[in-house]
Image (cartoon, rainbow, N blue to C red):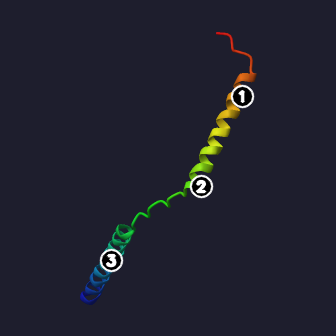
Amino acid sequence: MRMSHRRSHMQQCGFAMVAGLFVFSLITACASDQSKPLPQQTPDQVRSHADRAFEKLKQEEQERAAQPPAPR
């Protein structure tokens, strides 16, 4: 009886140690992740996005002008 009690206590300690190491490794793994900087856009990409937005705006204005005025 004494031997089985000692064995179960050692198993519990071993399990607690493994669980503790697992949690510790999760914490350190998450802490070591560095946020990566966003890639910088080239001037051509910025210009392309601006051109598309401007064209969309012009199209919306033309559609709005073609609609009859809404009564107020």
| Disc 1 to disc 2, C-alpha distance | 27 Å
Question: At which x and y percent is residue 54?
Answer: 63, 39
Image disc number at residue 62? 1
Q: Splitting the image into 4 quarters, where does residue 63 fall?
A: top right
Considering the numbered disc 3 on the image, is that residue within a helix, a strand or a loop?
helix
Instruction: Name the residue located 59 percent from the left edge and 55 percent from the top edge.
Output: 44
In the picture shown, does residue 3 fall above or below 36?
below
Q: Would residue 37 be found to the left or right of residue 8 on screen?
A: right
| Disc 3 to disc 2, C-alpha distance | 50 Å
Query: What residue is disc 2 on?
Result: 44
Query: What residue is disc 3 on?
Result: 21
| Disc 3 to disc 1, C-alpha distance | 65 Å
Q: Would residue 44 be found to the left or right of residue 38 on screen?
A: right
Callout 1, which amino acid? Answer: Gln
Quadrant containing the N terminus in the rendered view: bottom left
Considering the numbered disc 1 on the image, is that residue within a helix, a strand or a loop?
helix
Question: At which x and y percent is residue 33?
Answer: 39, 68
